[in-house]
């Protein structure tokens, strides 16, 4: 069960501050793209997301997109517009892309966290790779009936991950 439990939870990415990550020694924040940083299909980052990335940077935290999107252009275009490194078609929950990102950014597991909206890819992947996992609520479920089913199956694990203490 511990593999499916996030270290922290938040309603959305904007509840996570660079200062809080810095206090915990986090220097690399891996982030899922779709339904975590932006709704599915939104091609470019909104201004609020750009400001959040700048706030992270001000505290020595690098944002890094780790996306399972099978279309290479989706994470590439979004990451370039946001000004962050990325790995597309990451294969989460497998650990390879996590290790690749940490090596690329010259950080350790203890200095790395992942933020995402899915238990079985983001949280499980982070725990398998030995990094802290932050679970957020999905931005939007509309558009794909399979997403409703997937999130419904995750409910017990989301409840296990609920924490009183905020990041």
Image: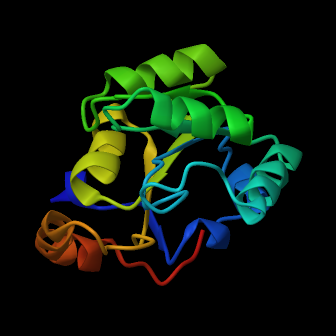
Residue pictured at 27% horizontal, 30% vertical:
91
* Camera sees residue 111: no
Asked where in the image residue 88 lies, by quadrant, the reply is: top left
User: Which quarter shows the C terminus?
Assistant: bottom right
> In this rendering, is residue 31 above or below 97?
below
For the residue pair 77 and 10, the one nearer the viewer reads as 77
> In this rendering, is residue 77 above or below 8?
above
Residue pictured at 32% horizontal, 52% vertical:
123
Residue at the extreme right: 58
> In this rendering, is residue 101 above or below 109?
above
Where residue 59 appears, as percent x and y from the top left, is 84, 48
Residue pictured at 75% horizontal, 65% vertical:
48
Residue at the extreme bottom: 164
Asked where in the image residue 25 lies, by quadrant, the reply is: top right
- Indicate the colouring scheme: rainbow
Left or right of 51 on screen, residue 49: left
Residue pictured at 76% horizontal, 59% vertical:
52
> In this rendering, is residue 156 above or below 88?
below
Where residue 90 appears, as percent x and y from the top left, is 35, 29
User: Which quarter shows the N terminus?
Assistant: bottom left
For the residue pair 44 and 12, the one nearer the viewer reads as 44
Where residue 122 appears, as percent x and y from the top left, is 34, 49
Where residue 55 appears, as percent x and y from the top left, is 83, 55
Left or right of 154 on screen, residue 27: right
Asked where in the image residue 79 lies, by quadrant, the reply is: top right
Q: How many marks?
A: 0
* Camera sees residue 70: yes
């Amino acid at each position: 069960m511990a593999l499916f439990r996030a270290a922290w939870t938040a309603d959305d990415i904007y509840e996570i501050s660079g200062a809080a990550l810095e206090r915990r020694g986090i220097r690399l924040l891996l982030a899922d793209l779709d339904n975590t940083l932006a709704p599915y299909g939104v091609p470019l980052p909104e201004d609020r997301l750009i400001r959040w990335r700048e706030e992270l940077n001000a505290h020595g935290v690098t944002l890094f997109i780790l996306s399972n999107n099978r279309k290479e252009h989706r994470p590439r275009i979004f990451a370039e517009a946001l000004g962050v490194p990325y790995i597309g078609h990451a294969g989460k929950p497998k650990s390879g892309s996590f290790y690749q990102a940490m090596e690329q950014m010259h950080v350790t597991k203890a200095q790395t966290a992942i933020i995402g909206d899915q238990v079985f890819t983001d949280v499980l992947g982070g725990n398998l790779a030995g990094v802290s996992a932050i679970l957020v609520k999905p931005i939007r479920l509309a558009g794909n009936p399979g997403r409703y089913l997937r999130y419904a199956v995750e409910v017990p694990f989301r409840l296990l991950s609920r924490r009183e203490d905020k990041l």
